[in-house]
Amino acid sequence: MTGQVRLHLLHHCVYALHYHLVLVTKYRRKTLTRPMLDRLRAIAEMRWEGWGGQLLECNGESDHVHLLVALPPNLGLSRFLNHLKTTSSRLLRREFATTVARFYRKAVLWSHSYCVITCGGAPLTVLKQYIERQKTPE
């Protein structure tokens, strides 16, 4: 990202929605390897493009992953995240079965919980001042 907020068009709206997502492995076990993170990135890019979004950045450690994404406003974020976690878990467990089997007996990879933080644009204090300074009709 270049620092400039890029606006997108969708039917009757203009938007720029960016989220910082964190997915954690079940029990915070140090399961993920570099090849698994690379494959997760490819899976996430495919899923986001299919749903009209964009994966801007993806990286992580052995027990969690950070994703920076741009999403359209008509996308149900929690529904999409569930879809991404289900798809990526199934594919990663299949493609890296030996690695995952060392940590989990059942068909699991991700924790049920996740973190999502909105980001981008101006700081809240600047937005608050801008709104406060609007010319209120008399």
Image (cartoon, rainbow, N blue to C red):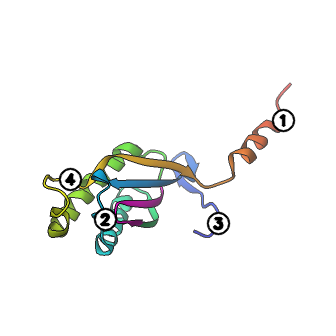
Name the residue: 22% across, 64% down: 92
Disc nearer the start of the sequence (3/2): 3
Residue 68 on image: x %, y %? 48, 60
Q: Secondary structure at mark 4?
A: loop
Residue 95 on image: x %, y %? 18, 69
Q: Residue type at mark 1?
A: Lys
Residue marked by disc 1:
135
Q: Which mark is residue 43?
A: 2
Q: Pick the residue in front: 41 or 48.
A: 41
Quadrant containing the N terminus in the rendered view: bottom right
Disc nearer the start of the sequence (2/1): 2
Distance of mark 4 from mark 2, alpha carbons?
17 Å
Q: Secondary structure at mark 1?
A: loop
Distance of mark 3 from mark 4, alpha carbons?
37 Å
Please state which of the two labelled residues, at mark 4 or mark 1, is closer to the viewer: 4
Residue marked by disc 4:
108
Residue 35 on image: x %, y %? 29, 75
Distance of mark 3 from mark 2, alpha carbons?
26 Å
The residue carrying pointer 1 sits among few (fewer than 14), some (14 to 19) or many (20 or more) residues within 10 Å by Cα, namely few
Give yes or no for residue 61 being in the magenta stretch.
yes
Disc nearer the start of the sequence (4/1): 4
